[in-house]
Image (cartoon, grey):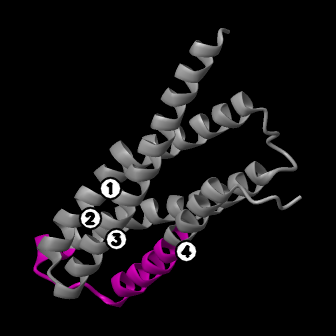
Amino acid sequence: MEMLQILMLENILLFVHLVGMVVLFGTAATIGLFMFWTHVTADPSMMAHVTSVAVRADAFLTAPAMALQLLSGIALARLAGVPLIGSWVTVALGIFAFVVVHWLPMVFIQVHLRDMARVARDTGASLDRSYRILFRIWVILGCGGFAGLLVLSWVMVAKPDIF
């Protein structure tokens, strides 16, 4: 490839990578805040609506952003000649895996919370103890995943010489 083509490709990949991280932070923060604020109301109707939106946002925004983040990051490392193993990229990939391991159960929990809230809304019942316990687990996973995103961002910027 010519130098100009390589620079254009690198700029495109950097842009995609940056947009992916912005979307990840944006959806994580927004979903987290809306879920928390709605949970405080204990209103099953509101929780059914907000968790439905959260599930869709994760499907249409978070999941594609994660895929773009991973693929563009690997492509950028390859383009720069940085090895995936034995460099800061190894650490970044490990942290990314940590974030995914926290995020995937959260999606399944959101689906379950949504279904529980719909049942409570449709029957006029209140959200029970199992809902509150599941929500607490969701919050714990979310805090871990969000902290992982923060650390991942630092690693991508600082590119520490760890090995």
Disc 4, SS? helix
Rendered position, 147 above or below 90 = below
Could you say which disc has been placed on residue 32 in the image? Answer: 3
Q: Position of residue 71 (x, y in %)?
A: 60, 35
Q: Nearer the viewer, mark 2 or mark 3?
A: 3
Is 163 one of the magenta-colored residues? no
- Give the alpha-carbon distance from disc 2 to disc 1, as whole Å: 6 Å
Q: Amino acid at mark 1?
A: Val
Rendered position, 32 above or below 62 = below
Q: Disc 4 marks which residue?
A: 144
Q: Disc 1 marks which residue?
A: 55
Q: Nearer the viewer, mark 2 or mark 4?
A: 4
Q: Disc 2 marks which residue?
A: 51
Residue bounds of the magenta highlight:
120-145
Q: Residues within 10 Å of mark 2 (few under 14, many from 20)?
A: many
User: First in sequence: mark 3 or mark 1?
Assistant: 3
Left or right of residue 143, residue 114 in this image: left
Is 135 one of the magenta-colored residues? yes
- Give the alpha-carbon distance from disc 3 to disc 1, as whole Å: 12 Å
Q: Amino acid at mark 2?
A: Thr
Quarter where residue 118 is shown: bottom left
Q: Position of residue 35 (x, y in %)?
A: 28, 73
Q: Amino acid at mark 4?
A: Gly
